[in-house]
Image (tube, rainbow, N blue to C red):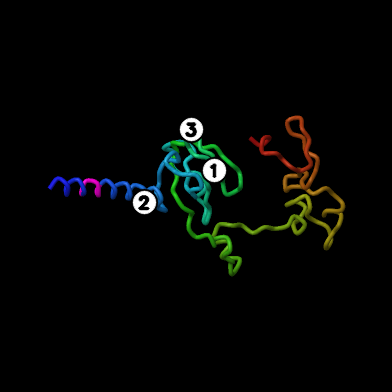
Amino acid sequence: MTDVADTDSLRDKMMKQMVHLDINAQVGTCMPLASMRIGTLIHNIEMNPGQGGKLVRAAGTCAKILKEPTSRYCLVKMPSGAEKLIDSRCRATIGRVSNPSHNTRTLRKAGQSRWLGRRPVVRGVAMNPVDHPHGGGEGRSKSSGSFGRVSQTPWGKPTKCVLMHFNGSSTYGFRSRELLK
């Protein structure tokens, strides 16, 4: 009789372990990064513990855990290719966000783009001089376009690879991420 009871308890323990492992590997499970393995594809990642998912939420995206989250921080490779250290107590969902073909959809007409809240883009050369620095002239005028004047924003600031100075360093039209922070 004790033999049967021992086998039942052993069987129960094994089933609990299998269920626990199955839950850990199941797609759609939300858990702290500390309890995940290397190479796990994740999405909807918190930046601070308990704050709610902030990163990797766009259609078809996923991030990958690169280092074992044994210490306080876990190294995660973002969809952009950047590697980010995230607190191991932060939670994430296992798997990839659905609808990966979202960006391949073609819009049938201009109105469909407007339904999505996108406004039309009008070239500055096609405007009047009061509306844009590139505007005006007779026909396709070169005096107000790219030949006569430097390319400018609608507010008159120079654009397109003009030497810019920020924080004492000069770059040719490129802003490093460190300077933007």
Question: Viewer-proximal residue, 144 or 15?
Answer: 15
Would you say residue 95 sits in the magenta stretch? no
Give the numbered dot on residue 22: 2
Give SS at disc 2. helix
Q: Is residue 50 left or right of residue 132?
A: left
- Of label 1 and label 2, which has the lower sequence position? 2
Comparing 19 with 101, the one in front is: 19
Mark 1 highlights which residue? 66
Residue 84 image position (x, y, % from top left): 56, 39
Give the percent coordinates (x, y) of residue 54. Answer: 49, 44
Front-lying residue, 48 or 32? 32
> Which mark is first along the chain, 2 or 3?
2
Span of residues in magenta: 8-12
**11 in the magenta segment:** yes
User: Helix or strand or loop: what does disc 3 sit on?
Assistant: loop
Q: Which image quarter holds the C terminus?
A: top right
